[in-house]
Amino acid sequence: MCMLCWGFDSSHRLQNRKTTMNKPEIVEITERSLSPFDCREMLMMAYYQAKNFSDDPNTKVGAILVNPKGMVIGAGANRMSHVSLVTPENLQAPAKYKLIEHAERDAIYSAARWTRDMLEGSIMFAFYACCADCARAIGLAGVKTLVIHKECMDKTPERWAEHVTVGHDILRRMGVEIVEWSGKIGDCENTFDGKVWYP
């Protein structure tokens, strides 16, 4: 089966480059089930997406959207909706809260733009998710499962805890399964709440 993904070569390693987000390359992947290895691989892709495309200097979040056939149909990062908005002033709070699109919604938008696949029944891999706005978008888009990374979720600052709790409650009420994957991702780094860590 084929997976669409941004920036991965045939050995599944991210190519060292920062480019504008264009139509995805096609990569052959043979595994069909969502085994723990697949969750790790998809979460790693989300971390790489965050590192290479997030505009937020303090917290970089990424998301990968996979259709029921196992094909990656969307990828997103928390970033400005247009390059003209990327200015030092706009990247600081409180301005950035009004201007940066969250990774989950960015992945949904990229799926709508680049594929004709229906989102119904898809799986989202987002190592850190989600606020109430993203929860509504995830549920309304037809995503059936959200896979998050426990070790990243454990870093939730108190000031964001209520947002995440409300987001998860909305997802459950909308029938979206939340899977918390636990384990070492390896071979990547992330900036979260102003600190670099190695998931």
Image: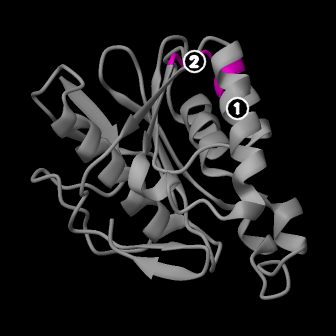
Instruction: State the residue at coordinates (24%, 57%).
Output: 184
| Element type at mark 1 | helix
Image quadrant occupied by the C terminus? bottom left
Residue 123 higher or lower than 144, as above or below: below
Q: Nearer the viewer, residue 182 or 135?
A: 182
Instruction: State the residue at coordinates (90%, 73%).
Output: 94
Query: In which image quadrant can residue 90 be found?
Result: bottom right
Query: Where residue 159 sits: x, y (%)?
Result: 77, 63
Q: Nearer the viewer, residue 14 or 123?
A: 123
123 inside magenta stretch = no
Q: Which residues are magenta?
A: 138-144
Q: Is 37 on the left or on the right of 189, as rendered? A: left
Query: In which image quadrant can residue 33 be found?
Result: top left
CA gap, disc 2 and disc 1: 9 Å
Do tag 2 and tag 1 residues touch (Cβ < 8 Å)?
A: yes
Tell me the number on the disc at residue 185: none
Residue 107 higher or lower than 91, as above or below: above
Write down the residue under mark 1: 135
Write down the residue under mark 2: 176
Residue 109 higher or lower than 17, as above or below: above
| Colour convention of the picture | one colour
Query: Where residue 134 sits: x, y (%)?
Result: 71, 38
Q: Is 195 on the left or on the right of 45, as rendered? A: right
Image quadrant occupied by the N terminus? top left
